[in-house]
Image: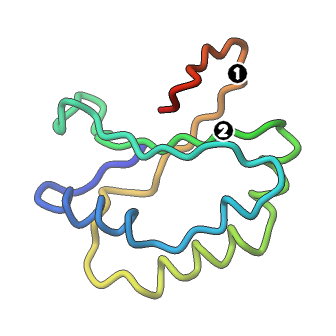
Amino acid sequence: GTAALPGKEAAFEMRWRARESRLTEMDGFLTFLLLRRDALKAEDGYNYSTLTVWNSRGAFDNWRASSANANARKKEKTTETEPMFDGPPSPVLYEGVLALLSGKGA
């Protein structure tokens, strides 16, 4: 999860909308979602989460080790003008065991 600072939620979301992503170019990438928690003042402090879905753990690991990932993180650090976060993100990894998908899309 990620904790956007109070009053910075709109800027945080705009940053994600405007950022250049190379995820769709990565082998095995399927989906990305930016999720906003219903309660912006959650007990654990995290009010946003990102979710990526990959066709295999190997594809995800390759992305994590890629120059595309490193360059995106480097660019984030150099273009940020004001702090938007209360500490670094807290990654959590899950392995999918069941997916129900609609032909209508998300």
Q: Please, what secondary structure does the residue beneath circle 2 have?
A: strand
- Residue linked to disc 2: 53
Residue 102 % position (x, y): 56, 20
In terms of image quadrants, where is residue 81?
Answer: bottom left
Furthest toward the right, the residue is 58
* Above or below 45: residue 103: above
Residue at horizontal 47%, vertical 51%?
Answer: 89
Furthest toward the left, the residue is 7
In terms of image quadrants, where is residue 91?
Answer: top right
Residue at horizontal 23%, vertical 28%?
Answer: 43
Q: Please, what secondary structure does the residue beneath circle 1 have?
A: loop
Near-viewer residue (99 or 87): 99
Residue at horizontal 30%, vertical 59%?
Answer: 13
**Where, quadrant-wise, is the N terminus in this rendering?**
top left
Near-viewer residue (45 or 69): 69
- Residue linked to disc 1: 96
In the displayed structure image, the side of residue 65 where residue 14 appears, left or right: left
